Image (cartoon, rainbow, N blue to C red):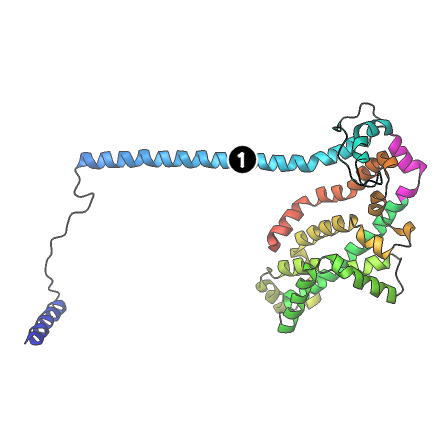
Amino acid sequence: MENKELFEQRREEATKARRKVYTHFERDLSFFESMTEEQRDEFFKGQRIRSKRIRRTRKVTKTVFTGLGLLVAIAVSVLAIVPIFYTFLNSFMSSGEISNNYGVIFQSLAGNTSKGAQYLAKTPSLIMVPQRVTFKQYLNLLLMSPTYLIKFWNSLMLVIPIVAGQMAISCLASYSFARYRRKRREILFFSYIILMLMPFQVTLVPNYMIAEKLKILDTPWAIILPGIFSTFAIFLLTKYMRQIPTAYIEAAKLDGATEWQIFTQIAVPMCKSAIIALTILLFIDYWNMVEQPLVLMANAKDLQPMSVFLSQINEAEIGIAFAASSLFMIPPLLIFLWGEEYLVEGISRSGVK
């Protein structure tokens, strides 16, 4: 009986719905409709005051955090720049002044006595501005002794072929990895990433063994060849080239362009910032290398670069070390200032953090 009544009720409701007959229900008043005009004005006035307070608080918070971030950036910049200024200004000090300022530091080092490292006997005086400016260190370095110029030329003879060769190979290999994405190529690219994550000390012994087998040990080729086939540039350029829209390449193919034309006229120009950024990073990296020449050119000291020469200057020649370090910083500093804009753009767009 109850089911029959429920059926009749639903049937009647369906009939009313088809005839668009609806039961009228009284709707409750909303929050604003239940207010008077004065109450609404008071409510919106309070909300405006609250909104201004929130905006003011956010502005103050943003200003405080921006100021703190700026102070941290200034502090980090000062910590990075002060040693450079110390090196440059101390290169104009006399040997006696350098000994008076830093002699207590050298006496406490492990190599100074047979007792090993010791605590400082007194507080060293770190003077930035020299009391008496002298160019004797630069005269001895550039005119009296040809060692620096020979080592400087050795550095150029090693770094320039490595950077040029690595950029040529990395551009070609990166275009291949970005243009033809097959399973075997992805496996090979993954192996490149694994090799990139390994520190060069891991591959130093295999490089030594291969150089010995090829009979290029104690020659510049023992450093140039492994440097040319490094994996970092290929990884970075591949990530960059994969961001090139495929529509550009397809349009070039429809116009009859060959793969070499697509590579030279589309891929390379669009990767200009990444190529310049890589050139700067590679130049600075190989300009400061020390372990590779010490291991692979141990018996050819005349062919070792300037970076090895700086690491072997003794305490008696600390003034020359300051002058040599100042001159040694000039090429990477100039190339960094030249391509700073491209460096920032290339690293940011390649996805490397």
Majority SS type along the magenta span = helix
Residue 12 higher or lower than 223, as above or below:
below
Residue at the image position 64 percent from the left and 51 percent from the top: 346
Residue 251 percent across, percent down from the top left:
60, 65
Res. 38 image quadrant: top left
Residue 150 higher or lower than 11, as above or below:
above
Apparent side of residue 235 relative to residue 289 in the rendered image (left or right): left
* Residue 143 in magenta stretch: yes
Residue 49 percent across, percent down from the top left:
32, 33
Residue 333 percent across, percent down from the top left:
74, 41
Label total for image: 1
Residue 19 percent across, percent down from the top left:
11, 68
Res. 327 image quadrant: top right
Residue at the image position 68 percent from the left and 68 percent from the top: 259
As drawn, the residue found furthest toward the top would be: 131
As drawn, the residue found furthest toward the left would be: 1
Query: What is the secondary structure assignment of the residue under circle 1?
Result: helix
* Residue 59 in magenta stretch: no
- What crowding class fits label 1: few (fewer than 14 Cα within 10 Å), some (14-19), or many (20 or more)? few
The residue range painted magenta reads 135-149
Residue 25 higher or lower than 213, as above or below:
above
Which residue is identified by label 1? 68
Apparent side of residue 234 relative to residue 154 in the rendered image (left or right): left
Amino acid type at circle 1 is Leu
Residue at the image position 64 percent from the left and 56 percent from the top: 270
| Quadrant where the image shows the N terminus | bottom left
Tell which of 26 and 317 is nearer to you: 317
Apparent side of residue 174 relative to residue 20 in the rendered image (left or right): right
Judge whether residue 262 can be spotted in this image.
no
Tell which of 346 and 312 is nearer to you: 312
Tell which of 303 and 262 is nearer to you: 303
